[in-house]
Structure formats: C-alpha cells, structure tokens
C-alpha cells in the first residue's frame, strides 16, 4: 500500500473515531490509527517544515487580491464556482483581471525563491506519498464494522476487512 493510501486511511479513521461500533472494530481502528501515524512520520515532518518567505508572499498576494478583486455588500471578496472546473474563482470588473494577473506576476517574481522552495517541497511530499508501506493493519470481519458506513468510507476502510471465504 502506498503512503498516500495510508494517509487517506488514517484520515478516514479520524473521521469515524466517535462512531459507535463493535469493540473489536474500535480496538482495530485505534491500533491501525497508531500504526498509520507511525508510518506517516516522515510525511508529517516534511509537510510541517516551514519555508521562510511565506508570510511576506501571502501579505503581498492579499494586497493584490484586495486591490483588484470585487467585493460584495459586506466587503467580502467575491468568488464564483466555475461550471467548467467546479472550483471557486475570483470575480473581477472591467480590466481588473488583467491588472490582477500582471500584479501577481510581479509578486511571483519578487518571491520566486519561496515559490521554487514550495514546488520543491511539494515534489518531495509527492515522492514520499508514492513510497510503499509494509505496515500490516489489524483486520476484523465485516459484521464488526459500524452499521452506518458510506461506500466511500468502506472503500478506504476495506484495508481492515477480513475477507471471509465462502
């Protein structure tokens, strides 16, 4: 199992930590959470490393956003979900989008070293998440799983499922 899947598994265990379940499932979930967190130590260390320059970059970026992005009646920055990609995008009036893009190019030039370090860190994290884990998680029969579980949760938690032969 790749560390990326271990991370997803540990995150899903965190989401269900207050769900009532059979004691064997609860025990296995607790043990698996500990095992998974131990396996993810290198990921945690790298992802939590602070890169100098972030505060200045964010300050400059927020300044540009504040200057060019449209605001609503409560002075909150406006954004809209795109029907194309489903992501939120800032709302601009007139030529402000062009000015925003140019200003952000300047911010990115000014903070090129910081951005380069962020990209390098992201690549390092991606490499770590591609590594294969050899951890053996505790397994329990399906009858011990919580009664209410979504298909997505089952997909992630099936690592804990004892496959019974029929």
Image (cartoon, grey):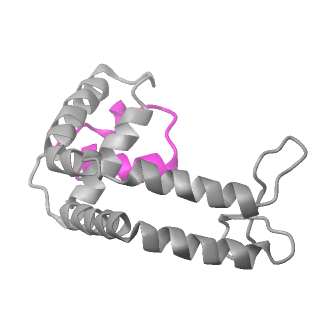
Q: Nearer the viewer, residue 16 or 160?
A: 16
**Quick check: 129 above or below 161?**
below
**Quick check: 160 above or below 23?**
below
Report x, y in % for residue 23. 30, 20
Report x, y in % for residue 140. 25, 37
Report x, y in % for residue 96. 78, 72
Is residue 161 highlighted in magenta?
yes
Quadrant for the N terminus in the image: bottom left
Q: Nearer the viewer, residue 41 or 15?
A: 41
Residue 34 figure quarter: top left
**Quick check: 113 above or below 74?**
below
Q: Residue furthest left?
A: 134
Which residue is painted at 80% across and 68% down in the image? Answer: 92
Q: Is residue 158 visible?
A: no
Residue 98 figure quarter: bottom right
Which residue is painted at 11% across and 48% down in the image? Answer: 135
Q: Which residues are magenta?
A: 137-166
Which residue is painted at 29% across and 52% down in the image? Answer: 51
Q: Nearer the viewer, residue 132 or 164?
A: 132
Left or right placement of residue 58 versus residue 37 in this view: right
Which residue is painted at 67% across and 59% down in the image? Answer: 65
Report x, y in % for residue 83. 75, 72
Q: Is residue 149 visible?
A: yes
Left or right placement of residue 151 versus residue 46 in this view: right
Is residue 113 highlighted in magenta?
no
Number of disc labels: 0
């Amino acid at each position: 199992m790749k560390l990326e899947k271990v991370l997803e598994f540990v995150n899903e265990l965190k989401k269900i930590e207050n769900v009532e379940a059979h004691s064997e499932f609860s025990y296995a979930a607790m043990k698996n959470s500990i095992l998974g967190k131990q396996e993810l130590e290198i990921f945690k260390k790298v992802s939590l490393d602070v890169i100098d320059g972030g505060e200045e970059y964010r300050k400059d970026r927020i300044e540009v956003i504040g200057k060019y992005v449209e605001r609503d009646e409560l002075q909150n920055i406006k954004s809209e979900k795109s029907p194309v990609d489903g992501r939120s995008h800032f709302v601009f009036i007139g030529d402000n989008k062009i000015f925003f893009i140019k200003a952000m190019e300047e911010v990115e030039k000014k903070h090129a070293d910081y951005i380069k370090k962020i990209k390098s860190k992201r690549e390092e994290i991606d490499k770590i998440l591609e590594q294969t884990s050899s951890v053996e998680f505790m397994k329990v029969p399906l009858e011990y799983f919580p009664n209410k579980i979504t298909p997505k949760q089952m997909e992630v938690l099936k690592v804990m499922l004892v496959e019974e032969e029929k």
